[in-house]
Amino acid sequence: MEFKQKNTKALFIIFIVIFALVYAIMTDFSRMKSYNIMSKLTLNNKKNVASSDIALVVIDDKSLHDIGRWPWKREYYLEIFDYIETYTNAKLMGYDGLIMAPDSENPKSDEKFFKGVKNFKKLSAGYAFSYDEFEKGINSLEYDKLLKEKSNLKIFDKRYKTKKTKSYLKSFTALQGEYFKNINSLGFVNVPEDSDGYVRKASQIIEYKDSLYPSLALLMYSKYTGISNFILTDKYIIGVSNDYTLKIPANSSNGFTSDFIHFYKTQDDGYSHIKYSASDVINSYRAVKKGEKPILDPELFNNKVIFIGANANAQALADVARTPIAENFSGLDIQATNFNNLLNNEYFRVVSPLYDFLGCLFIFLLIFYLVSVMSIINALLSSVLAIFLYTIFAYFIYSNSVAINLILPLTMVIVALSCAYCYRYLIEDNKKAKIQKAMGKYLSYDVMENVVKNIDNISLGGKRANVTVLFADIRNFTSISENMEADLVTKILNEYFSALVPIVEEHNGILNKFMGDAVLAIFGEPKKSDNHALDAVKCAYKMLKKVKYLQEKWLDEGKPKIEIGVGISTGDVFIGNIGSQDRLEYTVIGDTVNTASRIENYNKVYKTNFLISETTYKQVQEYVDVITIKNVVIRGKTNKINIYEVIRLVNQE
């Protein structure tokens, strides 16, 4: 009961602490890895196909081969923009390129490009925020003012809890002056990376110098849908028009408002959206200008939103990021995917931390309980079933664009199994200790210990051994007990045995059995001793002294005076397990046992208390003063023997 009330409570608290620690350490890591795993597993769902209304124009290896090595003259971009805006019915263009440094080798081309971009009303371009200050020579006030004009989107800040999260951004891309002035609209293209280097989120809004700025995708979505006003709350980005409704589950932190990206299945070329080489667009433009048939039919771009950017293996044009679905996923495709998510209201809703916590706690406690009430095999099978069912559930939830933690709950199954089996082991170990303690009331501790050590080899049989056997019997106890109440008899016997048993154990003996009011003790087996006869004699001597103390105590309590007699004999016996396969008893059999019993009976004849056989006397004669009683007839023996009354112990250190 004490273990149950104290140790069980303490162990359970320890296990809950372990649960809490694992939860705290594993939460972010497991959430990120779960997103990776489930994004890949659910990628082939029919729902996870990118919109055919979005296409990519990529400056790829083919483009460099066809048009020429990098860097290109910037007027080539004008050819791409002009073909899409003038000769196709594309709805919008998004240019994921940062025009930062002048082309010193082709200044006229730069001038043509900077002037030309103002003619493209469908074009929005990218820039990026930075944690560094503007370079010297940049008029930050003028740049900040111009950025607000180019990011002409109204975002109403209705946050309460997350509004005060500080933004550490200090500047943005120092775009070339003429380009910056002439481009019609700008959206940031910052792509946040998680701590493990993976891109899982898209930033939609960034707070910079107390103003809110839209991403390139959100800016283009505004143009596409006509939604010009957005509301930012603690949990959502909301935009509404007659034909479109946007409600992005987003989280604001350190100036960034982001949501989890819903990735789409990639094609053989590694892109999730339709992809065209920039060189094919340029050559199509040139062909149309000459009145020739273009490589790319303008109708391919009808009603599409086009994202333009670079991603080539050659000449340092690779623009890739690590994502859950690919280690080298196109940065341009990430921008397109973000727009695709907005357009179709497809993004992952992440369950709250409270759900994660309660779910993990439930799984932990469930597995803990199953292990405590089931067999090991059934508990393990149930745990495997729980893992399987939870994985199926997670797959279904992810397929419906809800991100839950997969790894942490499964980790909690393992943690719960470990804790539960530790707990079960400790409980069972405690039960074993209780059983051993209880069995110690029926068996000698040494006998019980020997049984426990050889628990797998318990059988009938034994061995011959040289031992000393001690009999101690209460004189005339039957007649005395007839005149006492049963409770009083029990109390006297319990007190008597309780006093004698420790003395036997103290002197390397084992208490073999109680026989009514008699005690049979064995010295020499299974507990080894250099002189078991002397151990037995010392034990008997101390037992008699203890009985004298009890006599005085009982007389003071009004109880009858009780005398005992002790008989000891040394010799060979059979010692071991006798009985049947179903019921064993560890005992001694042999002439030595009978002799000890007969000698004890002679205490009544000679009015003595402590008699030993000649075989015992030979082992202890230098340690005792005795009176010899000669030629005693022992029933069962042919020859008479000498027995000895022990008067006192001598030569004791």
Image: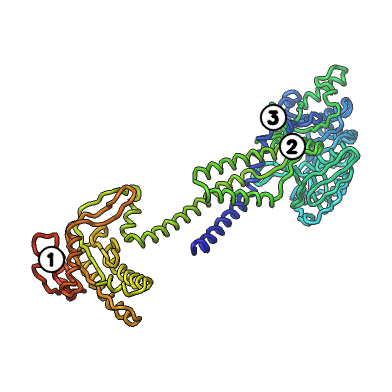
Residue, far front:
482
Dot 3 crowding, Cα within 10 Å, few <14, some 14–19, many 20+: some
Mark in the foreground, 3 or 1: 1
Please say if the residues under marks 2 and 1 sit with CB atoms less than 8 Å apart: no
Residue in the image at 82% along x and 24% along y: 300
Which x, y percent locates residue 462? Answer: 24, 51
Mark in the foreground, 2 or 1: 1
Report the side of 632 relative to 653 (left or right): left
Alpha carbon of mark 2 to alpha carbon of mark 1: how far? 103 Å
Residue in the image at 41% along x and 58% along y: 435
* Label 3: which secondary element: loop
Which x, y percent locates residue 313? Answer: 68, 30
Q: Quick check: can you spot residue 650? A: no
Counting residues from the start of the chain, the first of labels 2 and 1 encountered is 2
Q: Name the residue under label 3.
A: 270
Classify 184 as above or below 596. Answer: above
Classify 602 as above or below 278. Answer: below
Q: Mark 1 points at which residue?
A: 614
Q: Mark 2 points at which residue?
A: 334
* Label 1: which secondary element: helix
What is the count of numbered marks? 3
Which x, y percent locates residue 107? Answer: 82, 34
Residue in the image at 88% along x and 17% along y: 291
Of residue 494 and residue 71, the one placed in the foreground of this image is: 494
Residue, far bottom:
556
Report the side of 565 relative to 305 (left or right): left
Counting residues from the start of the chain, the first of labels 3 and 1 encountered is 3
Colouring scheme applied when the structure was drawn: rainbow
Q: Quick check: can you spot residue 605? A: yes
